[in-house]
Amino acid sequence: MGARKRLPLLLTTSTILAAKLEQPMTPSIKRMIKLLSPIEQATVEKDDVIALEEQVLTTLQFDFNYPSSLTFLERFLRLAKLHTHFSLASMAEDLLKVAATKCTFLDFRQSIIAAASFVIALSLCELKKQSKESVTQVLLLKSTK
């Protein structure tokens, strides 16, 4: 089967895997297949979805603990004691969303992207100097004493 014909199978399998991780109830494979167009339904079978699911899980070695840039951002905000500053957190998260849509950021570690969005949001929010010094210590991994 060609790569283009296997795309609905991969999409269905990926959606089911994501739902299994995030939802309390496991979705029905047959119901997920029925959501596809009639042409796509003809190329996807339940047994194929199960086989590809196994292949994906084996390839990833059942490891779904990938830290995202949002995880790092939340940590930076807590360490800088700025986690209650809603506008700062919201702006930094929006910057992360923009970065997630740009392929030029794929070469950077998630922690670097989070740190950059944090610093840019700080600059845009113009927090007082004391907070900026606290943030600098966090980003440089210095102890705050």
Image: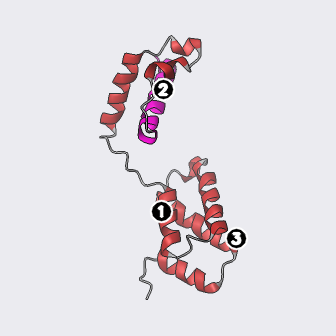
Amino acid, disc 3: Leu
The x and y percentages for residue 34 are: 53, 17
Look at mark 1 in the image and give the residue it sits on.
Answer: 72
SS under mark 2: helix
Crowdedness of circle 3 by 10 Å Cα count: few (<14), some, many (20+)?
few
CB under 8 Å between discs 3 and 2: no
Mark 2: amino acid: Thr
Disc 2 crowd rating (10 Å Cα; few below 14, some 14-19, many 20+) is many
Q: Nearer the viewer, mark 3 or mark 2?
A: 2
**Sequence-wise first label, 3 or 2:** 2
Label 1's element? helix
SS label for mark 3:
helix
Total numbered labels: 3
- Nearest to N terminus: mark 2 or mark 1: 2
Residue at the outermost front position? 24
**18 is within the stretch colored magenta:** yes
**Which residue is at a point 69% across and 72% down the rendered structure image?**
125
Q: CA distance from mark 3 to mark 2?
A: 41 Å
**Chief SS of the magenta region:** helix
Looking at this view, name the residue that lies furthest to the bottom: 145
Residue 49 place in picture, x, y as percent = 40, 22
Residue at which label 2 appears: 12
Q: Which residues are magenta?
A: 1-23
Q: Name the residue that disc number 3 marks.
A: 124
Q: Is residue 36 above or below residue 117?
A: above
